Image: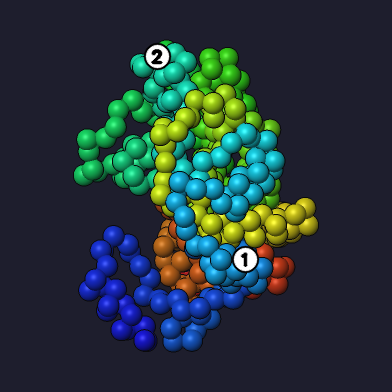
Amino acid sequence: MNTEKVISRDNDYILHTYGRSQVVLAEGEGMTARDADGKSYLDFTSGIGVNSLGYCHPAWVRAVADQAATLQHTSNLYYTAPDGKLAKKLCRRTGLDAVFFGNSGAEANEGAIKCARKYSVDTYGESRNKVITLVNSFHGRTLATLTATGQDVFHHDFGPFPGNFDYVPAGDFAALEKAADKDTCAVMMELVQGEGGVVALDADYVARVAAFCREKDILVIVDEVQTGVGRTGKFLACEHFDLHPDIVTLAKGLGGGLPIGAVLMNKKVADHMKPGSHGSTFGGNPVCCAGALAVLDEMDDDFLANVNERAAQLRAGLAKLPHVREVSGLGLMVGIAFDDGIKAADVRAACEKAGLLVLTAKTRLRLLPPLILTADDVDDALAILRCVLEKCV
């Protein structure tokens, strides 16, 4: 079907909850996506940080196809090999002790909130269940994770919301200290606020929060749904901050294109989660876990070295482009602020016409390229951006 027919059918039958580009992506390979009319695009979105190995990476395709042809699903009433193997790899790579698998970042963050409350209620009593998050955070679109999201724009029309969430400005330790009362069980934060504008937290602030929480036995939850699995040049963004959280959530790039979420936790939290305390029909699905294992197998030291080299190349190049006021974020999680009244949404649309797929986050352009990109890919993206920006004024 051509572009017009696919879009028409979509509009007739799919709920209108997305503001889509008028592009129908039909196939992809590596860094390149092609639409239904045959046009090629250099993709610097990776499906909003999901396609960590790009499109149709051969090792990933083989792992997924082989598992799909062997055993596609059983439910968690039975054991299978792929989820245990993935859990072991994740625990050894992160230093955490146990994993719960779900299907998305929102589900992972829901699980993290439940685990934190279970530990705290078991240990201190029923009233100790408040979760503090940061203004401009984004943690998902289910009711609890929407409540945890520190942006009012997402809260309209969906109340009443679950109780006992509070919000403090990122970087304001005094505000957090004041908000953390005797009923606080956890502080939940993104180390780089993605949907909040691709803004990294200050390292000193993170260290003060961690020390304060340790002293009060308030659990630290780090949402690494977007920052995790190599996106920032280390497997976890926590490693840049020398941070050892009680709970970490992963999703997006972990599955390499298949839906998976993970809640990793230390032993003191894990010990409170018993049979029946949480569950997911599709959690730990063998095919999704096989895809995730293929992703982890690629992410050796050389792979992450390339992520850091390309991030440095990209950031240096962006800083030299016309109308670029600031480059934010960490590693290959990049935000670009413009001056001269240039709107990120207009730049995104112009890049798409020129064959470069990019994203926006609030007022910034956002780049989340597949982690396999080469120096030539960076140069090509910078050339398109330069051409677009030179025509903006």
Of callouts 2 and 1, the N-terminal one: 1
Left or right of residue 30, residue 5 in this image: left
Residue at 44% over, 13% down: 124
Give the x, y percent position of residue 372: 67, 64
Give the crowd class for mark 2: few <14, some 14-19, many >=20 residues within 10 Å: few
Disc 2 is placed on an element classified as: loop
Q: Is residue 188 above or below residue 59?
A: above
The image's mark for residue 96 is none
In this rendered view, identify the residue nearer to me: 354 or 188.
188
* Residue type marked 2: Gly
Residue 63, numbered circle: 1
Query: Would you say 11 lies left or right of 270 here?
Result: left
Depth check: give the residue in front, 39 or 304. 304
Image height check: is 359 above or below 118?
Answer: below
- For label 1, count other residues whose C-alpha is less than 10 Å away and answer few (under 14), some (14-19) or many (20+): some
Of 172 and 148, the residue lying toward us: 148
The residue under label 1 is which amino acid type?
Answer: Ala
Residue at the spot of label 2: 125
SS class, disc 1: helix
Residue at horizontal 62 percent and vertical 34 percent from the top: 97
Q: Residue at x 41, y 46 (%)?
A: 280
Tag nearer the camera, 2 or 1: 1
Residue 161, image quadrant: top left
Residue furthest front as drawn:
78
Question: What residue is drawn where x is 35% and y is 16%?
Answer: 127
The image position of residue 21, as x and y in percent, is 38, 71
Residue 221 x, y percent position in the rendering: 52, 32
